[in-house]
Image (tube, rainbow, N blue to C red):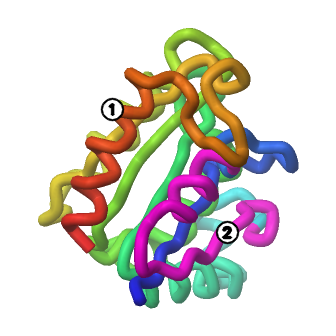
Amino acid sequence: MKQIIAFGASSSKKSINKDLATYTASVIPNANALILDLNDYEMPIYSIDYENENGIPKKAFDFKEKLKLADGIIISFAEHNSVYTAAFKNIFDWISRVEKIVWYNKPMFLMSTSDGDRGAKTVLEIAHNRMSFGNPHVIPTFSLPNFNKNFDKVKGITDIDLNNKFQKALKVFISNL
């Protein structure tokens, strides 16, 4: 069985991005999913001064170890002011200090969702540009607009056209595993 790490790149306790990532991991055949909560990895705001004085927090090593053991990574991005959430960016900054190859060149599936019509597409484009750099796999993306209208926790993506786009991207991710 493949080990999949999935998380919503948000610290919201009711994160719709975590819901989307969790659902996605649950539909991958022959896989065990480990759903991470960014709240479990809250660390001081990254700065070189903090790192020089205190070292890298243990939580950064813990997060990184989970990535290392995974066969694939699913991230659904929340968008704050058109970019990553502060919670995700801080974890990203810290884990990049543990080892240079942040995501271990693992197969990834990058998604985003929001209650708006664009589905957080801007942050998804930023994330894809950054995370595909140097990764040998084609990294599929999917944006789900109007989350509350187009998603059901049991049924998944309810809009037929959006579900077809999702399934196509999901197949690319699965083929990379």
Q: Position of residue 147 (x, y in %)?
A: 65, 26
Q: Position of residue 123 (x, y in %)?
A: 47, 31
Q: Position of residue 76 (x, y in %)?
A: 54, 46
- Residue drawn at (76%, 43%) of the image: 15
Q: Is residue 39 magenta?
A: yes
Disc 1 is placed on an element classified as: helix
- Residue drawn at (46%, 42%) of the image: 111
Q: Nearer the viewer, residue 59 or 36?
A: 36
Quarter-wise, where is residue 81 in the image? top right
Disc 2 is placed on an element classified as: strand
**What residue does disc 1 label?**
165
- Residue drawn at (43%, 33%) of the image: 163
> Which label's residue is closer to the chain start, 1 or 2?
2
Quarter-wise, where is residue 56 in the image? bottom right
The residues bearing labels 1 and 2 have C-alpha atoms spaced at a distance of 25 Å
Q: Position of residue 101 (x, y in %)?
A: 31, 73
Badge 2 amino acid: Leu
Does residue 136 appear in this view? yes
Q: Residue furthest left?
A: 136
Q: Are marks 1 and 2 in contact (CB under 8 Å)?
A: no
Dot 2 alpha-carbon crowd within 10 angstroms: few under 14, some 14 to 19, many 20 or more: some
* 120 to 176, vertically: above or below: above
**What residue does disc 2 label?**
36
Q: Quadrant of the C terminus?
A: bottom left
Dot 1 alpha-carbon crowd within 10 angstroms: few under 14, some 14 to 19, many 20 or more: some
Q: Which residues are magenta?
A: 19-41
Q: Quadrant of the N terminus?
A: bottom left
* 144 to 48, vertically: above or below: above
* 100 to 38, vertically: above or below: below
Camera-near label (1 vs 2) is: 1
